[in-house]
Amino acid sequence: MAPRIRQQAFSRLALTPGFQSSLPLRSFRSLRPKPSPTTQTFLLGTAAGASLRILITPPVPPAPGTPEDEYTTSVLHSQAAALPIVRQLTADPAFESWAAYQTLTPEHRAQHIMAGSLSGARGVGGYQRIFYNASTGEFVSVVFLGSAITGWPGVVHGGALATLLDESMARAAFRQWGGRSGVTANLQLEYKAMTLASGFYVVRLRARDDEELEERERGKRHYKSFVDASVEDAATGRVTVVARALFVGGQGNGKGKVEAGPKLAKVEENQKF
């Protein structure tokens, strides 16, 4: 009982105005039992194992169109609205913006790999907004890359990135041709760093002006479009992919004009896809 009495007496004195104790105060932290090295190793291994299991076998993402997917999409839209790049471009009067694929018909959307097969928050449909500067010809897309388009666990598949870039770069080509369709003649990608899934990314692209082309390619922009693009992490600005592409079509070269037939989108669909 003696230790308890001394503690109570000290507590009363400590509450007395003007009282200063000369007794050393022991840290409450020093009174906590310290785990043994074996326990520390066990806890560390358990935490690492749980993280590894989540990385290798992440939770199954909701299917597109389900209430769970719609809720996830709404959350992603709220998060995207707070991104500095989205706020900056939205406030810039030089840029107009629209949601990706909003002009596609329901029939075309159902057959479209990006708007159909890869839709939903698990793919590229959780958030993808296009910003366009008519005076410079620059396109900036902000997109959320979901967890179902990976190759190695947690890393976006290179083929999915190629598809995203092919689609994105076509916007610049079709805009150059006044909405006329075309096809990809050449696409070159250089993967600079891993593109991690379940994150926001920025796709920047622009079709080259005539004076930027090699001399032998000048004067052909009515049916040829050379486009440069990059993918960067929205949080860090780190570039993960750079790409170059050549599209052919537009008004045609008089030898094999590409028409917007059943397999190509109409002009009105190409305006804001």
Image: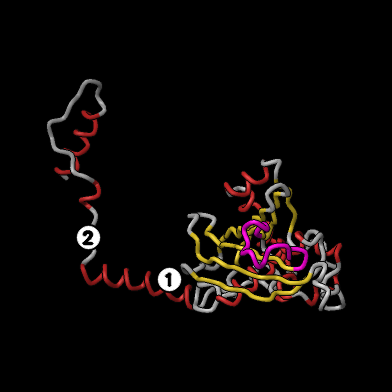
Q: In the rendered image, which quarter contains the N terminus? A: top left
Amino acid type, mark 1 = Ser
User: Is 127 located above or below residue 163 in the figure?
Assistant: above
**Residue at left 80%, top 72%?**
253
Specify the amino acid type for callout 2.
Answer: Lys
**Image position of 81 (left or right of 67):** left
Please report the residue visible at 36 percent of the width from the left and 72 percent of the height from the top.
46
Q: Comparing marks 1 and 2, which lies closer to the viewer? A: 1
**In this rendering, would 176 be left or right of 38?**
right
- In the rendered image, which quarter contains the C terminus? bottom right
Tell me, yes or no, whether the highlighted magenta stretch contains residue 209: yes
Give the camera-side residue of 7 and 48: 48
Residue denoted by label 2: 34
Judging from the image, what secondary structure is the residue with disc 1 in?
A: helix
> Which of these two is toward me, 123 or 158?
158
Q: Which residues are magenta?
A: 208-223
Residue 220 locus on image (x, y percent): 73, 65
Q: Which residue is mark 1?
A: 51
Q: Nearer the viewer, residue 57 or 207?
A: 207
Q: Splitting the image into 4 quarters, where does residue 12 fall? A: top left
Q: How is the image coloured?
A: secondary structure
Q: Is residue 240 magenta?
A: no
